[in-house]
Image (cartoon, grey):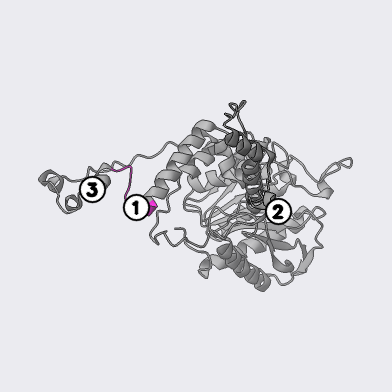
């Protein structure tokens, strides 16, 4: 039993055991060879990063209509530096980078190390400013924080000084705004057809090649065409004319958003819609006009066959969309007006909510409108957009379109 008087030592790692006995014998441990990698810690960190990536990939974003508690109600509504940077990065529409930019704008910045460095600096300064309440890029703000008395002491020169008068300079009209394509219907073939001044309604067509089976060649495999008089672009021109007949100013963009193919069309139409809102700031309702991808049986209204209409509202299920509640309210009002003016013209209940936002995050009253389907005729489309124009005019007169901020 004498040999068990000393405490028994249980070694879990052979390396530790050898180190212990070497110290007991007075043997110096050999210098470590190379760099020892802490595999256990590295593995734990790796698993943590993978778990965080899974959460970020699978968990949907919070609705952007909610405000964090640190955000003031009177926060600036001007576009951020990141907004301006991403909007200015007009990459070719057919590239993966452009598509990623639409879904996750931060991707576009990380692909450019210089822009990403600026972005990180802006995030850090913004975070510190939120915590401290001081504009760190302002010398007067820093001095006021260090010497609070300076905040109430103003020099005589500052008291007497008056802000310089701001000189209003009209920005030059972009050349693209006056582009002409003689094959386009109406308004002398102008790509941006303007009916009246200070338009209230803006129209564009993401799937500009959408046509109808009766008007495409017999060998066609898809109901698409670039003969604009047989496409949804012609239907949009009729809608613009009918809206103008009600006394409303309208602008229709006839930019070919499918010039790079159907997959890139929403990326291209995003910039088309942004240009429309920038060049025509008076617009209060934005309409992306389509025909349905599937057939709709026509309705009979006042004894005539009329294409049915469906209003599509994109939500914030997958990507932030702060305007989707307002868009839904406007769509419901428009569907009600259509049902009163032309009973039976609505497809189903008239309003369909989808998880995708379809560029409807740009402003309130940003709608996607589907008129008819691939088998519709142009006469059925013509009757339908006439009733649609009357319904839009009624919603405006009833105060159902929100004011722009």
Mark 1: secondary structure: helix
Residue 284 horizontal/vertical position (percent): 51, 57
Q: Is residue 404 left or right of residue 213?
A: left
| Up/down of 245 relative to 275, above or below | below
Q: Is residue 38 visible?
A: no
How far apart are the two marked residues, 2 and 3, measured between alpha carbons? 75 Å
- Residue linked to disc 1: 132
Task: Name the residue at 77% across, 41% down.
Answer: 225
Tell me if residue 104 is in the magenta stretch: no
Task: Locate residue 105: give its quadrant.
Answer: top right
Q: Callout 3: helix, strand or loop?
A: helix
Mark nearer the N terminus (3 vs 1) = 1
- Please tell me whether residue 49 is drawn above or below residue 286 in the rendered image: above
Q: Along the horizontal axis of the image, is 134 left or right of 244?
A: left
Q: Residue 262: where, in percent of width, then height?
A: 73, 42
Residue that carries the numbered disc 3 in the rendered image:
146
Mark 3 neighbour class, 10 Å CA radius: few under 14, some 14 to 19, many 20 or more:
few
Q: Which residue is mark 2?
A: 1
Q: Residue furthest right?
A: 219
Against 50, is 380 above or below?
A: below
Upstream in sequence: badge 2 or badge 3: 2
* Left or right, residue 376 beside residue 52: right
- Secondary structure mainly formed by the magenta segment: loop
x, y percent for residue 76: 40, 53
- Magenta highlight range: 130-138
195 lies left or right of 43: left
Closer-to-camera residue (61/273): 61
- Mark sitting earlier along the chain (1/2): 2
Residue that extends furthest to the left in the rendered view of this protein: 156
């Amino acid at each position: 039993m004498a040999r068990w008087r000393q405490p028994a030592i249980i070694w879990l790692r052979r390396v530790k055991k050898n180190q212990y006995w070497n110290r007991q014998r007075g043997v110096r441990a050999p210098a470590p060879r190379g760099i020892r990698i802490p595999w256990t810690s590295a593995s734990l960190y790796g698993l943590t990063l993978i778990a965080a990536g899974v959460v970020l990939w699978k968990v949907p974003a919070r609705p952007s209509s909610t405000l964090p508690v640190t955000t003031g109600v009177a926060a600036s509504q001007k576009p951020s530096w990141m907004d301006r940077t991403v909007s200015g990065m007009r990459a070719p529409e057919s590239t993966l980078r452009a598509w990623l930019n639409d879904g996750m704008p931060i991707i576009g910045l990380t692909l450019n190390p210089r822009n990403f460095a600026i972005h990180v600096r802006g995030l850090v300064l913004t975070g510190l400013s939120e915590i401290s309440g001081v504009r760190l890029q302002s010398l007067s703000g820093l001095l006021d924080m260090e010497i609070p008395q300076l905040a109430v002491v103003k020099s005589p020169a500052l008291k007497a000084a008056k802000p310089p008068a701001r000189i209003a300079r009209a920005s030059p009209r972009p050349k693209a705004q006056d582009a002409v394509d003689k094959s386009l219907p109406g308004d002398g073939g102008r790509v941006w057809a303007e009916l009246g001044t200070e338009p209230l309604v803006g129209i564009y067509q993401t799937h500009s090649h959408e046509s109808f089976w009766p008007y495409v060649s017999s060998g066609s495999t898809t109901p698409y065409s670039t003969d604009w008089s047989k496409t949804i672009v012609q239907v949009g021109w009729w809608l613009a004319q009918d809206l103008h007949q009600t006394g409303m100013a309208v602008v229709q963009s006839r930019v070919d958003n499918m010039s790079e193919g159907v997959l890139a069309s929403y990326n291209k139409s995003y910039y088309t819609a942004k240009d429309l809102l920038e060049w025509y700031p008076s617009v209060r309702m934005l309409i992306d006009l389509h025909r349905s991808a599937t057939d709709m049986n026509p309705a009979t209204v006042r004894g005539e066959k009329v294409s049915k209409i469906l209003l599509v509202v994109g939500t914030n299920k997958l990507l932030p969309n702060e305007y989707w509640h307002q868009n839904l309210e406007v769509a419901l009002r428009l569907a009600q007006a259509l049902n009163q003016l032309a009973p039976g013209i609505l497809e189903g209940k008239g309003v369909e909510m989808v998880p995708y936002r379809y560029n409807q995050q740009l402003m309130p009253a940003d709608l996607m409108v589907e008129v008819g389907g691939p088998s519709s005729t142009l006469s059925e489309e013509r009757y339908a957009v006439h009733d649609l124009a009357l319904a839009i005019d009624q919603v405006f007169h009833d105060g159902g379109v929100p004011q722009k901020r």
